[in-house]
């Protein structure tokens, strides 16, 4: 059974628990510091204008709180949940703005109103995300809603920010995807497909506009202890739960990744190795994932234990 897990290239429980404070990519260890480089010059978060969507709770709230701690001039926190957003912003000191990121007009208004009040946006974090269980049988309306939140919201932000950022020769887009965007997601076709699309969009933007001052990073965590993973009251039994990390630890990896202008930010550093193994022997990886899927279906709470 352990050999099957290795063949699937998926994390064992102790793998993720051992890496909760640092992000390691390609052998490098990045300790937390909130600054990023542009054209050889260190540019600090302090004094910058930042927007974070999906920030009423979870990763988004942790990012907003961390940027505030690092001295951002303003952090505009956005979410569709007005009541939770207001409470969160009151606690962490962010500026709230309700927006539905599935609406391009509301994304545009979020950008325009922020820049009218605070000046050009330096860092825009497209973080809102949802999931939906099931495969091809999922109704079009449900699949499209996941696409709207997980992919099109990133497209809307890029459509309205890239011309401004490239015109002034600087700006940063941070798009939250998932390890599912570079591997896959057992049990949710919509989540796997839309997170792959989010990664592909970020790649394309980086290739197309990286020489014109636009910086792009894509955040790809595995299990994170949020409502998306654990459920409303933490009641959900999930095979990723044993190795899940806290949202604050994701934020720690983000500021480190931004500091290095790292395209792929991996709060679970073992994902880089899974990607290499997947690419080196795709068929073996697929066989291993089928075995993991069988274990998850049999007992989702213990599938990752060895």
Image (cartoon, rainbow, N blue to C red):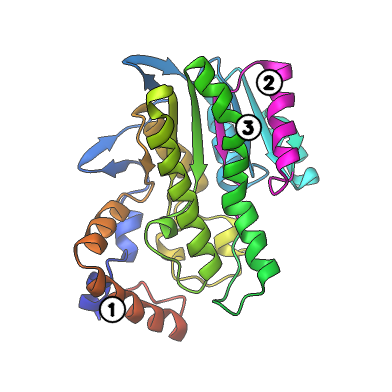
Image quadrant containing the N terminus: bottom left
Q: Assess whether mark 1 and mark 2 are in contact (beta carbons under 8 angstroms).
A: no
Q: How far across and down, in percent of the image, does residue 49 sit?
A: 59, 21
Q: Which residues are magenta?
A: 100-129
* Residue drawn at x 38%, y 42% as measured from the top left: 265
Which quarter of the figure has residue 164? top right
Which image quadrant for residue 303? Answer: bottom left
User: Mark 2 Cα within 10 Å, few/some/many (few <14, many 20+)?
Assistant: some
Callout 1 crowding tier (Cα within 10 Å): few <14, some 14–19, many ≥20: some
Q: In front: mark 3 or mark 2? A: 3
Q: Which mark is residue 115?
A: 2
Dot label at residue 160: 3
Q: Secondary structure at mark 2?
A: helix
User: Which residue lies under the disc numbered 1?
Assistant: 287
**Position above or below: 77 against 297:** above
First along the sequence among labels 3 and 2: 2
**How far is disc 3 from disc 2 in space, using C-alphas?**
12 Å
Find residue 225 and report its horizontal and vertical position in percent.
52, 55
In the rendered image, the vertical position of residue 126 relative to residue 135, given as above or below: above
Does 263 appear above or below 152? above
Lower position in the chain sequence, tag 2 or tag 1: 2
Residue drawn at x 53%, y 18% is 167
Magenta stretch holds residue 221 = no
Residue 273 vs 106, above or below: the answer is: below
Residue 108 vs residue 121, the one in the foreground? 108
Mark 3 neighbour density, 10 Å: few (under 14) some (14–19) many (20 or more): some
Label 3 residue SS: helix
Residue at the extreme right: 83
User: Which residue is nearer to you in this view: 107 or 233?
Assistant: 107
Where in the figure is residue 46, as x and y percent of width and height? 51, 17
Q: Quadrant of the C terminus?
A: bottom left
């Amino acid at each position: 059974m352990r050999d099957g897990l290795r063949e699937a290239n998926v994390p064992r429980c102790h793998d993720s628990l051992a890496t909760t404070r640092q992000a390691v990519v390609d052998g490098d260890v990045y300790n937390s510091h909130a600054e990023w480089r542009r054209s050889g010059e260190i540019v600090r978060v302090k004094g910058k204008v930042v927007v974070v969507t999906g920030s009423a709770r979870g990763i988004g709230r942790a990012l907003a709180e961390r940027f505030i701690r690092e001295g951002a001039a303003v952090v505009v926190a956005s979410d569709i949940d007005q009541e939770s957003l207001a409470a969160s912003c009151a606690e962490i000191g962010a500026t709230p703005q309700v927006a539905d990121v599935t609406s391009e007009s509301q994304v545009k208004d979020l950008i325009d109103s922020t820049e009218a009040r605070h000046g050009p946006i330096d860092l825009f974090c497209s973080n809102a995300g949802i999931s939906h269980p099931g495969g091809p049988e999922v109704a079009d309306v449900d699949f499209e809603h996941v696409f709207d939140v997980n992919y099109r919201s990133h497209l809307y932000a890029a459509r309205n920010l890239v011309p401004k950022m490239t015109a002034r020769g600087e700006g940063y887009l941070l798009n939250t995807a998932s390890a599912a965007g570079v591997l896959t997601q057992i049990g949710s076709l919509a989540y796997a497909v839309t997170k792959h699309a989010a990664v592909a969009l970020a790649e394309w933007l980086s290739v197309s506009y990286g020489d014109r001052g636009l910086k792009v990073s894509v955040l790809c965590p595995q299990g994170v202890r949020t409502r998306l993973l654990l459920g409303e009251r933490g009641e959900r039994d999930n095979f990723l739960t044993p190795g899940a990390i806290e949202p604050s630890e994701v934020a720690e990896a983000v500021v480190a990744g931004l500091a290095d202008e790292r395209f792929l930010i991996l709060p679970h550093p073992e994902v880089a190795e899974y990607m290499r193994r997947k690419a080196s022997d795709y068929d073996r990886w697929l066989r291993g994932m089928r075995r993991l899927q069988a274990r998850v279906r049999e007992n989702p709470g213990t599938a990752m234990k060895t």
